[in-house]
Image (tube, rainbow, N blue to C red):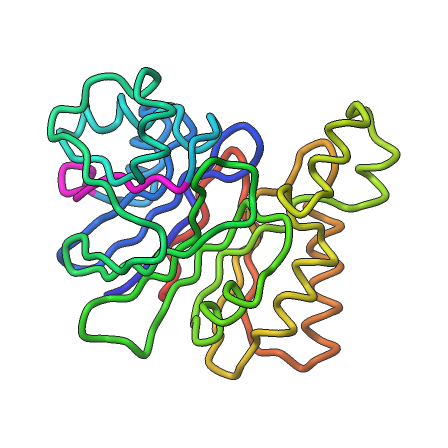
Amino acid sequence: MFQTAVIASGSKGNCFLVRTEQTKLIIDAGLSAKRVLEAMASLKLDHNKVEAVLISHEHSDHIKGAGVLCRKLNIPLYITDLTYNLCRARLGKLPLGVHHYKIGERFEIGDLLIDSFPASHDGIDGANFIIEKIGESNRKLALVTDLGYSSRLTKLKMQKATTLILECNHDVDMLLDGPYPWHLKQRIRSRHGHLSNDQAIELFQEIMHPELTNVILAHLSEVNNCPDLVEKLWCEFLRSIDSKSKLLISSQYEPTPLVDI
């Protein structure tokens, strides 16, 4: 067993889950601990066997519930030193302490091997992740959100993913015509902001391969994007290249089903 689910994703909070027979790992916890546990219950997952919470960067939509979740489940937090120093007050006391990982290194949590690499976002020390089950290197999850552009390293890391969780944040026209102040529009469109729908498709085109089975789109803006628009765009694109990848669009309010990586 090697599965993932998006508990929630969007500007109001992001949370992802990976599980094997031995290990459950929560990646980011930008919503309340109560909502995380309710979502796990809806997926029929035992929250008492979660191994840890892993944090990608310090923005509140990724860490808001992390401290409470660690205290409720009595589990450790994995986070970079720079990120922890910036948000330690918001996290509060952590009963099983903190494990500091360095971006660019590979480390293990239970029977999961995590390969961290830099995210081109405006966090102080943001990471994206490639995750595999130890001993089964033929299946890999690429968790790639909160990035303003796709670097050569990002593409290299993603090349052998069999399941992809990919940011698809905004439609450019909706963003430019929308209500956000100009400085925020510039930040979102910058090289340290978020991927647009078109940029996400371009990235997928560069890394796709026959074994890439699942694409889960994440971090859709409620103001500057629309799930129906994204689904139409991607379904037309996948048909045009005769891709067999299964498409899921994550929600801010409900978890996706568990997906076999």
Q: Residue at x 43, y 31 (%)?
A: 58
Q: From the viewer's perspective, is 223 left or right of 220? A: right
Q: Quadrant of residue 224?
A: top right
Q: Residue at x 43, y 76 (%)?
A: 160
Q: Where is the C terminus found, in terms of image quarters? A: bottom left
Q: Residue at x 82, y 39 (%)?
A: 174
Q: Residue at x 19, y 68 (%)?
A: 134
- Residue 46: x and y, percent? 19, 41
Q: Quadrant of residue 108?
A: bottom left
Q: Which residues are magenta?
A: 46-56
Q: Is residue 47 magenta?
A: yes
**Count of marks, rendered view:** 0
**Can you say whether 145 is above or below 233 in the image?**
above
Q: From the viewer's perspective, is 24 left or right of 102? A: left
Q: Quadrant of residue 188?
A: top right
- Residue 22: x and y, percent? 13, 56
**Can you say whether 3 is above or below 12 in the image?**
below
